[in-house]
Each structure stands twice: as C-alpha cells, then as structure tokens.
Image (cartoon, coloured by chain):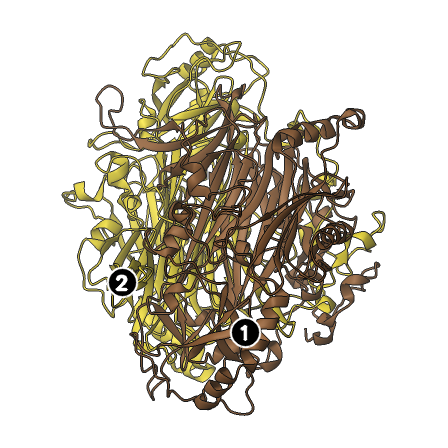
Chain colours: A brown, B yellow
C-alpha cells in the first residue's frame, strides 16, 4: 500500500465505522470520506527514496494513512468534518462546520428528494394543470440552487421537471425548490417562456416531434456502411502496471490516484528518471449559464465540488469507451451510509497511434527516417445530469503531456413558447431553439487544471515569454523583420494574463541546459487566448468562481490548497464575504480559494510553485449539438522547453511496414474476414454492449 | 476523365510537345505545366448535373480541357506563359512575361546550380580556408534570394554550404550567391558569427559532438520496449473510390485534385447530397526568419509558390507514413524538359478511430448510448529542404472537416561562435543554440487556407459572431450574468480580425433552419487568436506576404484568384510596387495578390464569396526540436452551425465490444502473437522499409 494509493473499500468501511461509533446510532449521513494526502514535504522525500531503491525506501518512515470524513447529522443541517488516522484507528478531530458551509450532493439524497418532489401534491397538481399526457412520465433534473443573495440559505435543490426518455426534450415550465434537510418542497417557481421575465401559469403541454438521443429510439435507421476498425497489439502493451497504481511506459513513470472529488489524479510524474510534475489534477470546473432571466440567473454548477468527478465517473467497460488493449483501474468511494460504492473501470489506459512522430527525407540522398507518434492514454468519463465530460491525459514519446477535455451528452434545456408554422415563434439572443418549445441557453465551461511542477526538483520559477518585433533600425534591424523573445519572471503569486504572442513556461533556474545555456523548463501550450468568464466579475458567478476570470494563476505551494473555488462549493458564499465563523463552529481546514491564495502575493521565484490554468469554453449551442452533442475538444499541452539537449524521441524505433502491416485498399477483397483474436475477452464482453452488435 | 481530374502523364507530354514545337529545338526549360480549371460558373453547373444523374450529365457540354505552361528559353531570363487546349491540340496563346516575374525553383536547375556552386574555384578555396576536414563533404542548401531592395534583380539562389549526413549540424560561415540563368557564382557573402553584424573571414572549422537525425547514425541505442500496434479493417474500408478521384464515405462525397503547386485539393465537397464547399486548398505558405542580421534579413520562402507543394510531395508508401487499410493516390507533374515526373503515393487516404463521437448515460435508468468517432484522413507530406510539412484533411461523421498541418523535419541552422567550456559562448535573443556552433533562428510559418464555400448554393455571406456580456440591469439582467451573441454581417471584401470572443461563420441567408429560424451555416474554429506576422508590415516580408498580416480575408470570387501571395512569388516585387509592365511583355494572367483582391471592397453579401484563413505558427526553436523536430500540430475546423436540424451523427451505429474486440490487459499473455493478415501486401511491402524491422 503506497501512501498515495486511493482508498480501498476496506479503508472506507473502517473509517465510517469509527465515525459512526463517535456519533449516536443511525445519525450519520456521510457526504464523503477522502484520503488526506500526507504533507508534501514528507511526500517529496518519500517519493525520492522510493525511486532511489528498495533499501533507501525501507529505511524511510512511512507517512501515516489519514482520511477525512464530511457528514451531516441525519435530518439536520449540522455538518461535521472529522480527520482519522487509519494506522491507529483513532478519530483525531471532529469539528462542527459553520452553517454557511454545505456538503456536496450525494446520490442517495438526490434520489430521495426527487421522489419527494414528484410525490408532492402541489407538484402533482401543477403537472396536471399543465396537461402532461398519460403516456409521459415526469422526472426530475436536479440542480444546485446556486446563489442570488448574500442571505444565509438552507441547503436547497431546484428541479426542472422533465418527461422520461429524452427528458430534456420536454422541459416543464416550472421548477420546485426543495430543502435537502427536510426533503420538502418549499415553493414552485414558474419559468419564463418568452424573451423576457413574463411567466404563464396556464401554459399547456403541446406535442412536438421528439428529439431522441437513445439509439433504440431513433426515427432514422442506422448507417449500414460503417465497416469495423480494430486496434491490435499482437505482442502485448508497451506499458507495465506495478502494484496496481504505478505505471511505466516509454521512459515515463507515474502513479494513478483517484478520489471522489477530483476523479483521476497523476502523481510523481517523471521521465527518464527526471522529476517533472508532483501532482496533476482537475481542481474544479464551473458551468455558468448566460440566460439573464430569473430564475436562470442562478443557474450554474461546480461539477467537481458540488458533485464529484470521482463520484460521477462512468464504468468504462460497459460503455465500450476504449479501443485496443485496455487496462482498467477500479476504485471505491463512500455512499451516504458509509458503505462502499464500487467504481469499476472508472479509468482506462491504453496506447494509441496518433500519426507521425517525426520524419525527415534528405532530398539529395533520398534517405528517410520516420517514427510514429505512439501515445499513452488515460481516460475517465463523468456523467453530471445532462452532460458528459471526458478527461484524458495523453503522454507522448517526446516527453510532452497533453490534457484533453471533451464535452458531450445533452444540452441543458429550458422551455420556450412552442413553434409557429414557419419555425420558432420566439427567439432570444442568449440561447438557441433546438426543438419546438425547447431552448438551449448559452453557457460556458471553465475547467481549472492544477499543475504542481517539480522540474528537476522543487524550486521552480514561472516566466512569461513574449515574441516581440524589433523596430526598424539602420544598424541592428535594417530590413525591419527582426523579432526577439523576452522573458519576464513572475516574482509574486497572482493571476496572469494571456496574449497571442505569449507562452508561459515553468523553469528551474538552478539547472542549466548545457546546449542552450539557459534554465531547463516546460512550456504550457493552450492555443490562443480564450474568452474567460463572461458573467460580470461582481456577479455571484464571478465572485464564487474567481478562478474563471483569469486564464492563469500562480501560487506558492501550501498543503491543502487543492480546489480552485475552495473546499465547499455547494451554494458557496464568495470567499471575500466570509467575514466570521459562528462561535463554536469551524471553517474549512484550509480556508480561501485560488484568488485568495494567489492574493497573498507570496514570493515565488525559485520556490515550490503551483500553476493553475483556467481552460474556458464558451458554448453557444447549435442544433447540431442536440439531442446529444458531438464531442467538443479542448487540449492543453505541457511540452519540454530546453529541458532536454535534443529531441527526446530520437531513439524511437523506425516506422516500418513489417511492424505496421498496413494493407493496400486495392488488395483487399471486401468479403475476407480475419479470424477472431486468440485471446478471449472475459470481463470486457460482459454487459449490455454486445446485444446491440449492429455493425 | 473528369474536368477536375489531375493532369495525366500523357497530357503533360502532349502539352510539352506542343510547346516544344512552337519554339526553337531544345530551347525550352519548363517551369511547370498545370491544369487550367474551367471557369467556376461553368463548373458549378457541370458538377450539379453530374450529381443529379448520368442522363443530365450526358446532356451537359463538357468543359474544354486546358492547361498552362510556364517556361524559360534555356540559358536566358526570358520567361513565357502559354495556354493550350488539349482537346484541339492548339496552343491558344504565348506571352512573354515582364522581367520582374520569375518562375519557381525546379529540381533539375537546383541540382545544376548546386554542382556549379561546389565546383566554383572561389567556393572551393573558401572551404579550404575554413579547414573543413577530409572526412566531411560540403553540400549545398538552396534558398531563394528573397528581396532586400526595390531594384530589379536577376534570378539568384543563395547557398549555405553544409557538410554531409546531417548537413545542418555544420553550417559553414559563408553563402555563395548564384545566378540561375548563367549558373555562375556571383559572389560569396560572409555570415556573421556573433550577436551582431561582425563577420570573421578567418573563422576555422571546429569539431563538436554530432547531432544526427538519421536512424542509422544515432549514438543512443533504440528503445526496445515499444510493442507493435496495428490497425485492422477486417471487412474492408468504409470508403469507396470511383473513377480514380471521386470518394464517398459516410455521406461525404468529394473529388481529390492535385497539381504541382497546391498539392492536394478537395473539390465539390458535399454531405448527404447538400453542397458544402466548392474548393478547399492550401493557397500559399510563408516562412520568414526573425534574425535581423544581414544577410538573414532576406531569409524567407514561399514553399507553395517558390517550390510547389505538389512537386515536393513525398512518396508515402516507402516511408511507412500511413497505418491501417490505405488507399494511395498517385499523380504526375512535369520536369524541366517537359517529361513526366511520377509522384506515386503522394496522397494517402484511410480511416482512423479518434475516440468517442458522442455519449450519454441516463443516470436514473443507466441506459447508455455511445458511438465512436470514426474519421476519414487524407494526408500528404512535403519535404522542402530542411523542413517537412504534413497536410491533412480529417472528415468526421458529424459533418465537420478539420484541416491539420504538422511541421517536422530539421530546423534551419546558421553558424555561431563555438561553445565555451560552460556552454554557448554567444547567445542571441532571436534564436536558440541547438548544438555547439549551431544556431536555429526564430521564425514563423504562415499558411493560407483557401475556403471556397457553396453552402446549400453559391450565394453565401460571412458573419462575425461575438459573445458579448450584458451590463447589470435591474429589469433585464439583475444578476449581471447574462451574455448574448451578436452578429455583424461582413458587407465588403477585406481583411477580418480575430478575438477570443469571436467566431467567424459562413451562412446562406436564402436557406433557413426550420428549428432555429436562422440561416444555415458553417463556423470556422481555429483556436484563440494567433500571433500574425511579426515582421514589420512595411518590411519586404510584410509587403510580399500581406496575407500573413491578418488572420482572415474575404473576397468576392473571381476565376484565377487562387494564390494568396500572387501567381509569381519567387523574388517577388510587392504587388503594390508593380507600377507598369515593360512594353512587349505581359503580367500574370490574373494580377495581384489577396490583399489587392480584397482591397477592391466588393460587395459580398449573398454573393459567391471566398474565405482565406491565415494560420500562423510562431516557432522559436527549442533544443528538443533538434536534430529533427517532433511534430507540431495546428488544426482548423469547419463545423456545421445551424446547417442541420440535429446532430448529424445520430444514426452512427453504437460502439460495441463485439465490433471493437478490445482486449483486457490482464488477459493478455505477452508472448502470444496473432497470425499475419490473410491479405498479402504487395506494393506496400516493396522498398527499404522492411529492412529495418527492429521492433
């Protein structure tokens, strides 16, 4: 068991038992049980010893195995935070949280409030009044309440009642507000149906041609001309998995971590024995909507802090999500009763061929050298209500890492006045009509990628490197074509901007590249500048998700500063408004958010720095995104920049036909089939995937 | 034979014979023989008739098959442009070009001048003086002279003499200037070796550790842990190729074109029978260097106009460049003697799996629908001296096209003072030292993608769509989170800017989307704003490559306006300086460049418009790019935006294990091997590729 290994089911049960023992019987409603990673100073030494050799590691004191537990007293709004030492089976501390803090959503309570909602007499009456036909079943789509004032609020959920199958295709024109603690409907909000705030409590259901995403409900027949494409590794995979979570591949070495909140985490990433990154994680994501009408102006969610990327992860085997020779990683998280929820196959790993790696032909001699671009993929997919997000790390043979995010799933929809004979009867500038009576509002997705570097050691520096044109100068630049690169060292923590001529680099000034004479480093390549948060900085969205206002932030490392919007995002009060903690209660173990940590203005030259990259996608829906959207892809690349003396992939073997076994189109007779692979696929073939083998 | 089919070898020979007959014997030095595509007005009707049915097409008059020929009178600087009707075997016209115009480089003359250079006594003496050891062989790296004044100049080439194998690893400190017409060395330029203009004619050769790119010359042993990865299509490919150049795949239909200059061209692209794009091509590319010192301030090349992307294309079979079930397209171009140069396998086509296409899981029912992202790839690779460029089109099942450009090959190098004991003795702000005594200067690559749309017809409009935040407003935006999209119609031809909140769209205002009520269209997604040309707009670089100053241009279509920097790029005079044509000579058939065509200010609403996208990469070399660089990738996506009523990929069959045949890592025993494929690979297995089967 490595100190960074994810919690096992047995550990979760042991921790929850200790918490239950410390509380009245049946009184504990768990929100989460999570690994408390050891202090970084201790971990860096441990990891270095581990990579050195077994003897050195054996001599090193193993960090204590500690976890945290967040829980409610059942039926109350009393939230508690406890820390536990699993080695000694001791509950170290229990603190009652100040009432401004709320725990995230869990599935048991979400299901309970949905049932409460649908059984509420006022809700049933409203549905009746709306005239929903008998062949349609209302369902609930759960959203955090968000925030629209500075008043302390009870934990609430809001529901837009939807019909079954593609529920999003028939949004009902009202939204019940529910109290999570009492599980009672507080009141029902009528939703506007036009271009302004006007509501119509007498709006009636009207049928329209259904937009179905489910493959069994499609009106159109499936394409019949798609031939299979399979990926084979006839001599096995190039990667190795050791002790469940340690991976080596093509000079890379790293540990796979996982928790309910961040989902997949990469620890202790090294290349060819050199330290690169201590920890890489999705620290938060925020999805605010741009529809200004009440109540939509509250509509936003922190899918990591409010729900949990680990909790929401798909089981990838059943979904047939990965192609080739696949390694699956499975995990365990806690449910509301402190029992184990298995997350089987939450992360998959496999190799891909991504075209050519490098090539050159010497024109005079016709000598050719060429290698292919083999990559290692780690992938996880989360479902958060209507949306899916795919998070991937791609590692390549030239020592670069690429973080890839894809959005798919279903647009969030709201009702709008039904269409007329010539098309929509109402259009709005903040959304797109995607079906009759169905509006998909504009929104953004802003992800925070947390990069904790350790480039050849822990003392790193962040620099901005700009390409700057030289002025015409008779002596130095007579033809006016010169340009130079200029670096600005980022001396203090804070936000950083973006520009088309700017590249951000992390460097180690204590380590020089022998060839260039300059410090070794890695560069962050993220495309050109993106549109950041469009909501006003002083709006609740802007104040609760300050990280989304700027594309980059740099902080000086402190233990526990992991989540860009703070520890408790559910209906959070902006950090700058937390003026005091009620007597007898506690705040978060680590208070603040990214903006406040960066706002300390710590000196960060040659220090243990953390770089946070806010990756923003402005999503103005198109009808092609409905009823389920083709993947939209964002990529951030971390590429060596003077870290090595030459191309790290020079020693990749040549691409040859003998290995590649490509086949000429003209040589192929369409009816020939290959025999099935020699290896039976056991676990992967279980499940519903094969019953739909229409190919 | 389709009017847009590339020229065949027989046609090239026929055309050159006609030209030779019209000139004194052995006097013709051909520069190029190219298809003159019929007038667009005629082609649109022909293509529509062709897509309609065979009877309609049979009734349609076939356009004349016409070609152009550009040639010199041998041993002179007299350049001629002729047009030929191949149907009637008649030379329609021959025009003598004004001396300001030059033809591009061709391989025969490039080889001849290299030989002339290396045999020149002054060059030999200089090499001797430099002290190049006997085990090293000087070679020539040919560059266009470029421009550094307004004076008319003879056609010249400049050489940086290099040593063999990785010649770029030992750049010699002088550059002979050669006259292409006389093939004589005019003079030799000494190259600066420090951070300023100072040269040192007494500089001596010093040995350093070699930086070799060739796989047989690597000091380091190859990686031994890379296991094979193969792609199979056991039931054949999903695409069909009809009559050599017409391709259908997953509702796509298009023609593959090819010529010496643009390389691969896509014609008449339709999806599900709807017209999308009339013509897609690489209209130019420009690679200017940012080193301000003489003579490097001239250093730049138009790889399309000066050399030809078609002429420089690799034979893809020998290089093992493509993986899977491959269709190769072969072409023919002319050599300097009017004979045929075969370009076998210049374009490859195959399918790839690019992960997930779309997915949704209904959390309450656990119903899952998922399809994979199958793409069709068309790929060509060009070698232009030191650099390789890979140009690809990726077509997907959601009706999007993705243009992908990758740069690889070898950085262009210049000499610098040798290193000292602690690293480089000289560093400069406009380049990177990549080996002892070897500097790789900063440079840019600016590509022009020419997009000739025909979205549901020829009358299209370009719009800029911005995401704009709404101000706080008690009535309309009380929470300050609202944002809207606003469109500006581009009324007149000209350049267009870029911004993080802006998306460019091409729409057809005569065709409304029934669901949204808005015009159908396609959007251009090209990442955030890129750094455009850093050279001063009034420099020779800026004036010769005006297209590189702005990211987008829109023009009203005119036949022959195809190349962003004009027809004759070699040592071109900026278009705005072409004040007159010498009496008795001609200018280009279609004068001007993109800036002048856009500068007409034509009305372009609901017109036949052309969109030109300047894709700029600022390349400040890193040591990891040397001695051969890992691919650097740029992508531009053309995605439907309200063109369809829903996701076009809804009817793609589900991704299933039965079809995908993934294998579990744990199930695989490393020693098992699959039998070889049933189908012998005949042509593809020929060549040197298999002798290096080290995997």
The chain to which mark 2 is attached is B
Is residue A515 visible in the rendered image? The answer is yes
Q: Nearer the viewer, residue A58 or B11?
A: A58
CA distance for labels 1 and 2? 35 Å
The image shows residue A641, relative to residue B577, as above or below, that is above
Element under disc 1? loop
Residue drawn at the location 48% of the way across and 83% of the way down: A122
The image shows residue B104, relative to residue B280, as above or below, that is above
The chain to which mark 1 is attached is B
| Extreme-front residue of the structure | A583
Q: Residues within 10 Å of mark 1 (few under 14, many from 20)?
A: many
What is the total number of numbered labels drawn onto the structure image? Answer: 2
Label 1 vs 2, first from the N-terminus: 2
Residue drawn at the location 34% of the way across and 89% of the way down: A421
Q: Quadrant of residue A409?
A: bottom right
**Of labels 1 and 2, the one closer to you:** 1
Element under disc 2? loop
Q: Position of residue A463 (x, y in %)?
A: 43, 30
Callouts 1 and 2 on one subunit: yes
Is B677 placed left or right of B471 in the picture? right
The image shows residue A197, relative to residue A277, as above or below, that is below
Q: Residues within 10 Å of mark 2 (few under 14, many from 20)?
A: some
Residue drawn at the location 79% of the way across and 62% of the way down: A683
Can you tell which mark lies on residue B650? 1
Can you tell which mark lies on residue A656? none
Residue drawn at the location 59% of the way across and 18% of the way down: B209
Q: Position of residue B688 (x, y in %)?
A: 68, 41
Can you tell which mark lies on residue B557? 2
Q: Quadrant of residue A381?
A: bottom right
């Amino acid at each position: 068991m490595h100190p960074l290994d994810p919690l096992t089911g047995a550990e979760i049960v042991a921790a929850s038992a200790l918490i239950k023992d410390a509380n009245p019987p049946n009184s504990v409603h768990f929100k989460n049980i999570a690994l408390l990673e050891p202090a970084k100073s201790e971990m860096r030494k441990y990891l270095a010893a581990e990579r050195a050799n077994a003897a050195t590691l054996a001599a090193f004191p193993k960090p204590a195995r500690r976890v945290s537990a967040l829980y409610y007293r059942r039926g109350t709004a009393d939230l508690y935070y406890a820390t536990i030492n699993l080695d000694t089976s001791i509950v170290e501390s229990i603190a009652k949280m100040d009432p401004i803090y709320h725990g995230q959503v869990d599935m048991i309570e979400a299901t309970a409030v949905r049932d409460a909602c649908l059984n509420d007499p006022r809700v049933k009456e409203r549905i009746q009044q709306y005239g929903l036909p008998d062949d349609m079943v209302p369902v609930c789509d759960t959203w955090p309440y968000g925030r629209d004032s500075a008043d302390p609020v009870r934990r609430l959920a809001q529901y837009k009642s939807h019909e079954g199958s593609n529920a999003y295709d028939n949004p009902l024109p009202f939204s019940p507000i529910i109290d999570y603690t009492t599980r009672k409907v507080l009141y029902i909000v009528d939703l506007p149906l036009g271009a302004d705030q006007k509501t119509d409590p007498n709006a009636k259901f009207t049928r329209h041609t259904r937009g179905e995403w489910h493959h069994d409900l499609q009106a159109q027949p499936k394409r019949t001309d798609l031939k299979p494409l399979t990926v084979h590794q006839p001599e096995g995979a190039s990667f190795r998995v050791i002790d469940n979570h340690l991976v080596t591949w093509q000079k890379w070495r790293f540990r796979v971590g996982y928790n309910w909140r961040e989902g997949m985490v990469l620890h202790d990433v090294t290349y060819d024995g050199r330290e690169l990154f201590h920890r890489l994680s999705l620290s938060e994501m925020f999805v605010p909507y741009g529809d200004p009408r009440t109540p939509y102006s509250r509509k936003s969610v922190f899918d990591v802090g409010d729900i949990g990327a680990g909790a929401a992860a798909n089981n990838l085997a059943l979904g047939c999500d990965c192609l080739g020779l696949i390694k699956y990683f499975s995990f365990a998280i806690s449910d509301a009763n402190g029992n184990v929820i298995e997350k089987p196959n939450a992360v998959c790993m496999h190799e891909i061929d991504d075209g050519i790696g490098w090539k050159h032909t010497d024109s005079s001699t016709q000598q050719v050298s060429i290698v292919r671009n083999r990559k290692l993929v780690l992938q996880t997919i989360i479902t958060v209500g209507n949306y899916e997000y795919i998070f991937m790390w791609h590692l390549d043979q030239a020592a670069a890492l690429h973080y890839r995010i894809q959005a798919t799933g279903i647009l969030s929809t709201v009702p709008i006045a039904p269409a007329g004979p010539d098309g929509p009867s109402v259009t709005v500038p903040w959304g797109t009509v995607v079906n009759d009576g169905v509006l998909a509002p504009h929104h953004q997705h802003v992800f925070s990628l947390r990069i904790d570097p350790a480039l050849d050691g822990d003392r790193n520096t962040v620099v901005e490197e700009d390409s700057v044109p030289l002025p015409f100068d008779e002596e130095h630049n007579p033809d006016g074509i010169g340009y130079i690169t200029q670096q600005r060292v980022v001396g203090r923590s804070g936000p950083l901007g973006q520009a088309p001529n700017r590249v951000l680099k992390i460097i180690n000034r204590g380590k020089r590249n022998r060839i260039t004479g300059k410090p070794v480093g890695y560069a962050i390549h993220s495309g050109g500048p993106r549109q950041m948060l469009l909501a006003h900085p002083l709006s609740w969205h802007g104040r609760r998700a300050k990280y989304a206002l700027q594309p980059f932030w740099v902080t000086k490392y402190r233990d526990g500063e992991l989540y860009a919007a703070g520890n408790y995002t559910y209906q959070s009060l902006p950090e700058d408004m937390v003026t005091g903690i009620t007597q007898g209660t506690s705040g978060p173990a680590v208070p603040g958010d990214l903006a406040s940590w960066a706002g300390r203005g710590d000196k960060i030259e040659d220090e243990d720095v953390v770089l946070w990259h806010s990756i923003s996608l402005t999503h103005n829906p198109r009808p092609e995104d409905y009823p389920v959207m083709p993947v939209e892809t964002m990529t951030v690349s971390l590429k060596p920049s003077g870290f090595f003396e030459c191309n790290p992939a020079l020693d990749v073997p040549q691409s040859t036909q003998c290995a590649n076994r490509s086949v000429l189109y003209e040589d192929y007779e369409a009816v020939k089939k290959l025999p099935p692979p020699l290896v039976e696929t056991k676990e992967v073939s279980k499940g519903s995937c094969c019953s739909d083998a229409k190919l």
